[in-house]
């Protein structure tokens, strides 16, 4: 039947969405931190709760999606999913309209959505859920339809399934938090040849154009003009022109999407600003110890990691962080904290390269075992 097929499809979508985030809960928590940033919702006090909140959201998605799939507590499940979709719809619309979070993380690193694509996806899901709600409305029990009643004989097997599903998802999520994601959807997975990836980016780069926000000082009119038209039209910049660029309001707009990879952000420099990236990628063996929050790392743990890294016979060893004095016994290198988080899911984290190819990556505590 149509309603059963629609219920099945929506349930699978929520389970898949929750699963790819459950595999990498730390990565999803980084995305949550973006929403709490001052330029988005300005709630920095929630950043320290990003991981617990991420776990809560993923549990909701997974359990409700599975309950919809097996048709358990249908009225409650559909109502909760509709509320969840409205909430996510608000977030994705805000992100898209104000262009503040470029990827909602709805499907983790497995599938990337633009903000507007994310919003459209939420609207489609919301409409689908409402349709399913209407199609099943005659089957809802009039009494206790929102109550929790696991003792019902007919639902025992479904609750057993839900329990087993929950245990499996908890184990998968826990593994990703303590160690590395069980399935790595990132561009920095083991086996990736970073040099080859950088060549693909060079051959097919994304093209951006700058759009200037111009204000006519005589009439107050405001225009958005791309960089090419701005140069061609002398009326915008000639001496005596009433048009002035509004500082801080210019936009960089994607014109052509090239080869997409987070590796485009890989730029490692020494504390004086000298680019070390190419020398690291061409080294027969390089060990990189990353820390995106060096102030939160135990000095004793860093000391142990540095000692082991130095003893591994690598051609190149660097400690890469956001502070030039983080590492005491190995050379310090610098990298943007957000870019480090695309590589490292723990703090500190070890990445091992051989001629630019990732041969191993693991949290520092696992590296020391």
Image (spheres, rainbow, N blue to C red):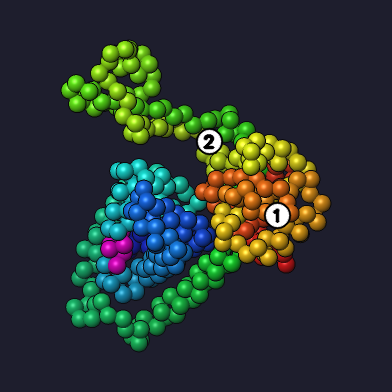
The image shows residue 13 at horizontal and vertical percentages of: 40, 58
Establish if 268 lies above or below 52.
above
Residues at circles 2 and 1 in contact by the CB criterion of under 8 Å: no
Residue at image point 42% right, 47% down: 103
Q: Which residues are magenta?
A: 80-85
The image shows residue 131 at horizontal and vertical percentages of: 24, 59
**Residue 9 visible (yes or no):** no
* Horizontal arrangement in the rendering, residue 252 relative to residue 302 (left or right): left
Establish if 30 lies above or below 273.
below
Q: Which residue is mark 2?
A: 259
Residue at image point 41% right, 68% down: 56
Report the Cα–Cα distance between label 2 and label 1.
38 Å
* Dot in front, 2 or 1: 1
Ranked by sequence position, the earlier of labels 2 and 1 is 2
- Tell me where residue 199 sits by quadrant: top right
- Tell me where residue 180 sits by quadrant: bottom right
Q: Callout 2: helix, strand or loop?
A: loop
Establish if 278 lies above or below 242.
below
Q: Which residue is mark 1?
A: 328
């Amino acid at each position: 039947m149509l309603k059963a097929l629609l219920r099945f499809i929506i349930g699978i979508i929520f389970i898949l969405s929750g699963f790819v985030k459950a595999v990498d809960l730390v990565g999803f928590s980084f995305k949550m931190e973006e929403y709490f940033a001052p330029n988005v919702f300005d709630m920095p006090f929630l950043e320290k709760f990003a991981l617990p909140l991420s776990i809560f959201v993923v549990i909701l998605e997974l359990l409700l999606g599975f309950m919809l799939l097996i048709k358990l507590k249908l009225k409650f499940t559909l109502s909760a999913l509709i509320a969840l979709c409205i909430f996510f719809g608000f977030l994705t619309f805000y992100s898209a309209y104000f262009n503040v979070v470029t990827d909602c993380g709805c499907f983790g690193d497995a599938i990337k959505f633009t903000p507007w694509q994310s919003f459209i996806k939420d609207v489609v899901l919301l409409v689908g859920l409402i349709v399913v709600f209407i199609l099943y409305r005659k089957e809802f029990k009039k009494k206790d339809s929102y109550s929790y009643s696991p003792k019902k004989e007919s639902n025992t097997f479904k609750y057993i399934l839900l329990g087993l599903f929950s245990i499996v998802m908890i184990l998968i999520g826990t593994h990703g938090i303590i160690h590395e994601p069980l399935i790595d959807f990132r561009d920095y997975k083991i086996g990736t040849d970073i040099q080859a990836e950088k060549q693909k980016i060079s051959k097919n780069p994304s093209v951006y154009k700058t759009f200037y926000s111009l204000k006519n000082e005589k009439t107050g009119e405001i225009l958005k003009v791309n960089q090419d038209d701005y140069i061609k039209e002398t009326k915008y910049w000639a001496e005596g022109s009433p048009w002035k660029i509004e500082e801080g309001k210019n936009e960089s707009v994607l014109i052509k999407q090239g080869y997409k990879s987070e590796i485009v952000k890989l730029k490692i420099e020494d504390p004086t600003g000298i680019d070390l990236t190419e020398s690291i990628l061409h080294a027969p063996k390089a060990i990189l110890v990353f820390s995106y929050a060096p102030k939160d790392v135990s000095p004793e743990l860093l000391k142990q990691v540095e000692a082991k890294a130095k003893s591994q016979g690598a051609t190149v060893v660097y400690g890469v962080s956001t502070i030039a004095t983080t590492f005491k016994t190995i050379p310090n290198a610098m990298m943007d904290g957000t870019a480090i988080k695309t590589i490292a899911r723990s703090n500190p984290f070890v990445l091992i390269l051989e001629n630019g190819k990732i041969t191993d990556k693991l949290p520092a505590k696992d590296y020391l075992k």
